[in-house]
Image (spheres, rainbow, N blue to C red):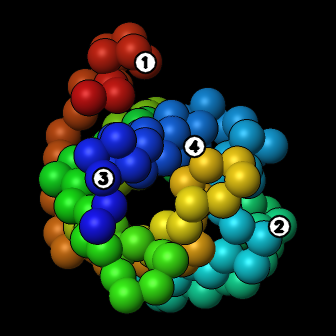
């Protein structure tokens, strides 16, 4: 059974994911993944699958990111091997001046994480969007007011 301290550390991994993406800190972002990590990201424009830490980080570098990354409703489930399944919900506001149309975007993450010598890391990360809502945002508002 995954003990409460390990569950808290897994929550920290999920939190760091959003913070490092928002900061565009690619070196530290890469440290969140095992060497042979995989991603499966789906959107209204298609599906992206990447294998290997460097390929994953390179893909994230080139993506049009939202104003902020929010993750909530994190559930940690033990698996039969050394890996742990994590299910969470994401919410991403596309509210910056360059985002057209302005929208709110959300869905589910299905992750597999593993404890390594660097701490908990992603083995695989799947993003399944479930909703997208176009909104009207006052572009005259200061940038810090458009991050939700």
How far apart, in angstroms, are the residues tagged by discs 2 and 3?
A: 31 Å
Q: Residue at x 70, y 48 (%)?
A: 118
Lateral position of residue 6 relative to residue 65, left or right: left
At a point 28% along the width and 67% down the height, the residue shown is: 1
Q: Which mark is residue 8?
A: none
Disc 3 secondary structure class? loop
The residue identified by callout 4 is 21
First-in-chain label (4 vs 1)? 4
Query: Which residue is tagged 3?
Result: 3
Between disc 3 and disc 1, whose residue precedes?
Answer: 3
Residue at image point 78% right, 71% down? 35
Inter-mark Cα distance, 4 to 1: 18 Å
Tell me the CA gap for discs 2 and 4.
15 Å
Q: Quadrant of residue 136?
A: top left
Marks 2,3: beta carbons within 8 A: no
Q: Nearer the viewer, mark 2 or mark 3?
A: 3
- Cβ–Cβ under 8 Å for marks 1 and 2: no
**Cα distance in 3D space between marks 3 and 1:** 41 Å
Count neighbours of disc 4 (C-alpha within 10 A) and say few if under 14, some if 14 to 19, many if 20 or more.
some
Residue 54 appears left or right of 17: right
Q: Dot 1 corresponds to which residue?
A: 143
Secondary structure category for the residue under label 1:
helix
Lower position in the chain sequence, tag 3 or tag 4: 3
Q: Nearer the viewer, mark 1 or mark 2?
A: 2
Q: Is residue 148 visible?
A: yes
Q: Which residue is mark 2?
A: 54
> Who's the residue at 31% across and 74% down the image?
78
Res 134 visible: no
Position in image of residue 99 (x %, y %): 44, 46
Instruction: Tell me which numbered mark, 1 or 2, is placed earlier along the sequence.
Output: 2
């Amino acid at each position: 059974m995954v003990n409460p301290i390990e569950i808290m550390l897994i929550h920290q991994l999920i939190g760091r994911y959003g913070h490092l993406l928002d900061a565009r800190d690619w070196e530290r972002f890469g440290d969140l993944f095992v060497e042979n990590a995989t991603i499966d990201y789906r959107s209204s424009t298609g599906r992206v699958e990447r294998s290997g830490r460097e390929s994953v980080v390179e893909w994230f570098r080139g993506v049009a990111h939202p104003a902020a990354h929010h993750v909530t409703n994190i559930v940690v489930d033990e698996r039969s091997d050394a890996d742990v399944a994590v299910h969470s919900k994401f919410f991403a506001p596309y509210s910056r001046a360059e985002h057209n149309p302005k929208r709110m975007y959300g869905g589910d993450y299905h992750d597999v994480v593993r404890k390594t010598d660097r701490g908990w890391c992603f083995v695989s990360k799947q993003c399944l969007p479930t909703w997208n809502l176009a909104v009207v945002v006052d572009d005259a508002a200061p940038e810090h007011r458009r991050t939700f």
